[in-house]
Amino acid sequence: MVVTPAFLANKIASLSFYKRRFNLPSMPKKPISVGDVLPAFSLFDQHNEPVSTSDFLGQPLVIFFYPKDHTPGCTAQACDFRNYESEFQAVGAQVIGINEASVKSHNGFAEKYGLKYPILSDPGHLVRKSFGASGILFNTVANRITYVTDKNHQVVYIFKSLLRATDHVEESLSFLKSLVK
């Protein structure tokens, strides 16, 4: 791929649009940690519908950032969240997947693997960066990290592991179940 001045100008304009449109904050000085409240955000899902954290007020969230659609580890992780979706619903939690891929890519990914929960498009990693979540490959690709919140969207658990993709589901669900005992 040849990166031309026109390509760069288009990418910068696109990122600026999303930052203004959704009033996204810049990269925080420190990463979000347990006890912090999630930054509010809105992104488009796989159906090109806006999804906001405010849509889930009063409900715990399980937000997972993952590197790329249709790759073995990411597909295993997304399908594992799908397989346990009813258990997450049983504890009142909403699962949300996020990465930089386009709405079109997410739509194909969700359809191919039967993913019903929101998969959000984060162009330029603006939301991931607002969480202070590190990336890989010079911060150009999302690292694999999961945030679990309480019903007030205060972070109660964070699990980060690039290589243990399916452990994100087990770790998140176990933690949520421990809260309702």
Image (tube, rainbow, N blue to C red):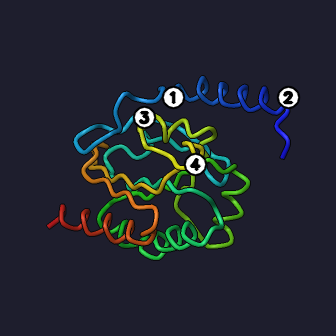
- Counting residues from the start of the chain, the first of labels 3 and 2 encountered is 2
Helix, strand or loop at mark 1: loop
Label 4 to label 1, Cα distance in Å?
23 Å
Tell us which disc is closer to us: 1 or 3: 1
Amino acid tagged 4: Leu
Camera-nearest residue between 155 and 88 = 155
Residue 171 locus on image (x, y percent): 31, 67
Dot 3 falls on a residue whose secondary structure is: loop
Q: Going from the N terminus, do you reach mark 4 or mark 3 first?
A: 3
How far apart marks 1 and 3 lie (CA) works out to 8 Å
Q: Of the numbered discs in the image, which one, if any, rests on residue 40? A: 3
Query: In whole angstroms, how far apart are the C-alphas of marks 3 and 2?
Result: 32 Å
From the viewer's perspective, tell me whether residue 6 is left or right of residue 51: right
Nearer the observer: mark 2 or 4; the answer is: 4
Is 41 positioned to the left or the right of 28 in the image? right
Amino acid type shown at disc 2: Ala
Q: Is residue 100 above or below residue 3?
A: below
Q: Nearer the viewer, mark 2 or mark 1?
A: 2
Residue 137's label in the rendered image is 4
Q: CA distance from mark 2 to mark 1?
A: 25 Å
- Closer to us: 53 or 163: 163
Residues at marks 2 and 4, CA–CA distance in whole angstroms: 24 Å
Q: Residue beneath label 1, please? A: 24
- Residue at 33 percent of width and 39 percent of height: 32
User: Is 32 left or right of 102, judged from the image as shown?
Assistant: left
Label 2 belongs to which residue? 6
For image coordinates 42% across by 54% down, the residue present is 145
- Residue 161 bears which disc, if any? none
